[in-house]
Image (cartoon, rainbow, N blue to C red):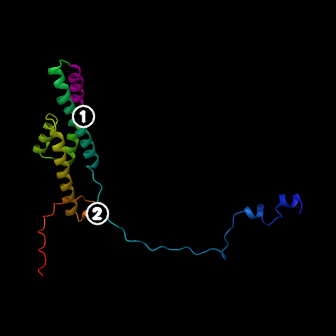
Amino acid sequence: MTSADVEGGADPDVPGPERLAPAVATPATATPATVTPATPATVTPPKDPLRGALIRYRVMTYIVGSALIVLVCIGVPLQVWAHFDLVAKVEGTIHGYLYLVYLFTAADLARRAHWRLGRILAVVLSGFVPFLAFIVEHRVVVQMRAERAELLAAEGFGPEDGAAAPTAPEAPTAPAAPPKP
């Protein structure tokens, strides 16, 4: 075997140009198209239009609530007892601007969810009282999840379809009496 034979593709182990060409299916070698049976369409619950607004509200609640705690627990004591006004001035300004953003996110959520006046007032006041923002946020989220679950249940979707159904704690059961011998 010469080098010309190897370069020309005479060696059966080395693919030549004719072996690299794609195979063309002829009618005799073509396979019939396979048809897959159609699967029944599953009905998915509708996308929650409040999800984004609720996430924005929750983020702003944690930011504003934390800023208020820093202001009240660090800034005000430093201002009153150490006569150091810088922390209270800076943190008070930051909290004020963040509170405005918080109000806009809460107003957006209230508009989308059709809140009543009581819930709106609780949300507005939670930006003024330390630690209250976290309590109100928790209650708002629980109530909104329950409302979403009720809405989906009314439309025929269950908890397995994506609705976050509220769960009640199970009542404790009495221990079984030991068997008598």
Mark 1 = which residue?
A: 101
Residue 157 percent across, percent down from the top left:
25, 64
Displayed quadrant of residue 45? bottom left
Indicate the secondary structure of the residue bearing disc 2. helix
Q: Establish if 40 lies above or below 163.
A: below
Q: Amino acid at mark 2?
A: Asp
Dot 2 surroundings within 10 Å: few (below 14), some, or many (20 or more)? some
Residue sticking out furthest to the bottom: 181
Is residue 95 part of the magenta span, yes or no? yes
Q: Amino acid at mark 1?
A: Val
Residue drawn at 16 percent across, 48 percent down: 139
The magenta region covers 85-97
Do the numbered discs 1 and 2 sit on residues whose CB atoms are within 8 Å?
A: no
Residue 44 percent across, percent down from the top left:
32, 62
Indicate the secondary structure of the residue bearing disc 1. helix
Q: Can see residue 150? A: yes
Residue 10 percent across, percent down from the top left:
84, 64
Nearest to N terminus: mark 1 or mark 2: 1
Mark 2 = which residue?
A: 161
Quadrant occupied by the N terminus: bottom right
Q: In the image shown, does 168 or 79 lie closer to the viewer? A: 79
Query: Where residue 80 is drawn, which disc sits there?
Result: none
